[in-house]
């Protein structure tokens, strides 16, 4: 059965207020109309999702999982902070550790919060991620059920990180989960959130994630997404960010899992003096396809955006980067900087990269640079001339390329985990 | 230590070295001079094993080993060091990490224990001071953002740290002001002893004012056309390379 055909049954098993039912219906209706994108769509030109379209996915039922051990094996066992764990899409309080929160902060599973205080979510849910664009976002909206809900009121500055774990056990064959993450940060509040996707084993499953971020005036959010799905899984994710004036948003997206991965980030800079940083690092091997599409809407004057994406592709892996920067006519004094660099370790690896700058204001500074290359031969010879063998020299240079994209992650534990991941993968290349 | 016989090499099908002979013994310093394009740097690169140069004939014996049969890293492990004319910048790799990897690669090759948690700053402090290198350099990426002089001094520093048997220094003095030349010369003199050998590839007499070579060779069109002692350098300085070419044809 298709997603559209399964939908009535889904609605029967999940309750909720009328507005939510309407939102879900609008989502599935939109998806039914759009269908899955094809490579004829400009936004999906290099990313063929037909393997997803051709597979019949069933809703996941939570499987067994030794979470502590999985986190340990993934190098994140010792991350401090609040912890929300979702197993196969369902919030698992027994594995979570919400801890002590500043007064007024709400943190938990979306399903629970929808059952208890739906009115707290109504002003936000579905407003950041508009369904009338992307068909995967529409599909996720049709199936909104659970995910991390983080509601931060005004004037809260918590130094503790909120770590969200979405774990796929692969217990159900061809399982689908559609986590919905909602992060609302109130005025003058400052928060750090990590959103992490882990898979176990080599199961085929499909994660269709949507994250909505809403930043009020003078709010700040540091967001890291670490995607370590199984390399046979499909991971489609969209993050929709709405930023009000004087707010700061920093995103770091690390991707190494998934047979097909698509990360879409849309950032609406809806006010003056906003600072938006979008950084990313992706590592592909085998036949992995990793696609990063970012879009920054500079709608008002005096906003800055910084963007650095780096990719390393080996074997027959493919990368796609599309960085759209849209500067509206009113958005004078915009400062936008975009860099994307890809390192190809094999002759068969490929990357399609496209900076897409659309500028209607005349007093702006927008720069972009894209490079695609192989390891520097001169550097390799230099290392070898000092006694270091080719394999190690390649590993050192690859690690160094990646590391430059890691040093600016604010969170030390996250940085350590990713650095260790890079060492394990590339030092002994 | 080093016995080069009738060495011929080409780059992109253009012959550069055309039958070069050179013999270097332990404890000796040889200076290779010659006009631009004579093949000085090619010789240095060929000895270090750069793959852009194709050896088309001749042999190089290094302490009883066929040097040309070895990979660049094996040559380094056997004790050959090339001081680069243009040291390469390696962003993201700190000097400490780089040196540690090099030292341990060489130790491993020689079946010695690898050094793990050692205090590099402490170990290298005196060499850094000798070369007037700021200690912060040790944690900076290799050559990145270094001035021209710092890069050359860093090459000599690496030579002191790795302590090779044979050091080939390719125009280590070029692009340096006179004070920097003195510093570099100090480093080379510190290194010089009876058990190692140095081949100085240089365009000018200048460096030789501070490091007295045992032999001077003049390279022209891929061959050594004249060998002599330090007086040869003075004659060259006075008359230029043209004098030598004429002189050579008269011989």
Image (cartoon, coloured by chain):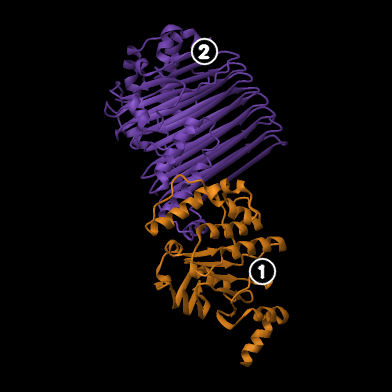
Chain colours: A purple, B orange
| Residue contact between numbered discs 1 and 2, judged by CB atoms under 8 Å | no
Q: Residue at x 53, y 18 (%)?
A: A184
Secondary element under disc 2, as helix, strand or loop, is loop
Q: Is residue A135 left or right of residue A204?
A: right
Label 1 marks which chain's residue? B
Where residue A172 appears, x then y in whole percent? 27, 26
Q: Are marks 1 and 2 on the same chain?
A: no
Which residue, given by chain and number where applicable, does mark 1 sit on? B210
Q: Residue at x 69, y 29 (%)?
A: A302
Whether residue A19 is visible to the viewer of this picture, yes or no, is: yes
Q: Is residue B20 left or right of residue A83?
A: right
Along the line of sight, the residue nearer the viewer: B51 or A263: B51
Residue projecting furthest to the bottom: B250
Residue A333's place in the image compared with A139, above or below, is below
Q: Residue at x 58, y 32 (%)?
A: A277
Where residue A190 appears, x then y in whole percent? 58, 20
Of circles 1 and 2, which is in front?
1
Q: Quadrant of the N terminus of chain A?
A: top left
Where residue A29 appears, x then y in whole percent? 42, 21
Residue A88's place in the image compared with B114, above or below, is above
Along the line of sight, the residue nearer the viewer: B11 or A10: B11
Along the line of sight, the residue nearer the viewer: B141 or A82: B141
Label 2 marks which chain's residue? A
Which residue, given by chain and number where applicable, does mark 2 sit on? A105
Residue A176's place in the image compared with A380, above or below, is above
Asked where in the image residue B153 lies, by quadrant, the reply is bottom right
Whether residue A40 is visible to the viewer of this picture, yes or no, is: no
């Amino acid at each position: 059965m298709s997603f559209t055909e399964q939908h009535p049954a889904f609605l029967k098993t999940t309750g909720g207020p009328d507005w939510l039912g309407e939102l879900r219906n609008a989502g599935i209706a939109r998806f039914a109309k759009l269908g899955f994108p094809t490579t004829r769509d400009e936004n999906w030109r290099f990313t063929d999702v037909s393997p997803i379209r051709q597979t019949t996915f069933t809703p996941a039922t939570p499987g067994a999982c030794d979470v502590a051990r999985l986190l340990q094996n993934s190098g994140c066992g010792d991350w401090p902070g609040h912890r929300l764990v979702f197993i196969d899409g369902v919030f698992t309080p027994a594995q979570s550790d919400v801890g002590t929160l500043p007064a007024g902060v709400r943190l938990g599973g979306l399903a629970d919060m929808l059952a208890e205080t739906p009115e707290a979510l109504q002003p936000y849910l579905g407003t950041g991620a508009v369904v009338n664009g992307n068909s995967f976002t529409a599909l996720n909206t049709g199936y909104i059920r659970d995910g991390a809900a983080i509601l931060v009121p005004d004037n809260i500055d918590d130094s503790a990180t909120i770590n969200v774990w979405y774990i796929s056990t692969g217990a159900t064959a061809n399982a689908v989960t559609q986590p919905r993450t909602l992060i609302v940060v109130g005025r003058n509040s400052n928060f750090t959130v990590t959103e992490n996707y882990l898979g176990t084993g080599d199961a085929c499953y499909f994660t269709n994630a949507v994250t909505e971020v809403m930043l009020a005036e003078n709010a700040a959010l540091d967001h890291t997404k670490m995607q370590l799905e199984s390399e046979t899984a499909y991971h489609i994710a969209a993050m929709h960010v709405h930023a009000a004036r004087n707010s700061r948003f920093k995103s770091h997206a690390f991707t190494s899992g998934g047979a097909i991965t698509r990360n879409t980030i849309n950032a609406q800079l809806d006010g003056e003096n906003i600072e938006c940083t979008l950084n990313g690092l992706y590592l592909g091997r085998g036949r992995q396809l990793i696609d990063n599409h970012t879009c920054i809407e500079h709608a008002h004057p005096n906003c800055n955006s910084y963007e650095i994406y780096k990719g390393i592709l080996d074997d027959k892996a493919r990368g796609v980067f599309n960085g759209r920067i849209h500067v509206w006519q009113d958005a004078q004094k915009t400062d936008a900087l975009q860099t994307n660099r890809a390192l190809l370790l094999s002759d068969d690896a490929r990357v399609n990269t496209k900076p897409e700058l659309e500028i209607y204001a005349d007093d702006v500074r927008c720069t972009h640079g894209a490079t695609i290359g192989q390891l520097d031969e001169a550097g390799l010879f230099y290392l070898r001339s000092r006694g270091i063998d080719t394999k190690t020299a390649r590993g050192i240079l690859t690690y160094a390329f990646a590391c430059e994209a890691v040093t600016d992650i604010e969170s030390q534990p996250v940085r350590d985990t990713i650095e260790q991941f890079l060492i394990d993968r590339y030092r002994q290349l | 230590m080093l016995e080069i016989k009738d060495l011929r090499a080409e780059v992109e099908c253009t012959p550069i070295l055309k039958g070069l002979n050179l013999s270097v013994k332990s404890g000796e310093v040889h200076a290779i001079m010659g006009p631009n394009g004579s093949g000085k740097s090619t010789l240095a690169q060929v000895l270090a094993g750069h793959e852009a140069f194709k050896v088309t004939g001749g042999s190089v014996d290094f302490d009883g080993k066929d040097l040309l049969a070895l990979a660049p890293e094996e040559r380094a492990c056997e004790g050959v060091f090339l001081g680069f004319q243009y040291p390469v910048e390696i962003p993201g790799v700190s000097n400490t990490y780089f040196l540690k990897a090099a030292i341990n690669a060489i130790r491993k090759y020689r079946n010695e224990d690898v050094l793990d948690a050692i205090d590099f700053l402490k170990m290298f402090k005196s060499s850094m001071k000798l070369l007037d290198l700021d200690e912060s350099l040790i944690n900076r990426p290799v050559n990145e953002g270094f001035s021209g002089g710092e890069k050359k001094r860093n090459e000599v520093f690496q030579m002191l740290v790795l302590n090779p048997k044979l050091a080939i220094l390719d125009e280590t003095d070029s692009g340096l002001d006179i004070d920097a030349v003195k510093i570099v010369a100090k480093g080379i003199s510190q290194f010089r002893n009876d058990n190692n050998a140095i081949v100085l590839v240089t365009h000018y007499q200048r460096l030789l004012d501070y490091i007295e070579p045992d032999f001077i060779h003049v390279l022209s069109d891929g061959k050594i056309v004249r060998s002599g002692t330090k007086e040869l350098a003075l004659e060259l300085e006075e008359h230029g390379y043209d004098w030598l070419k004429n002189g050579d044809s008269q011989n």
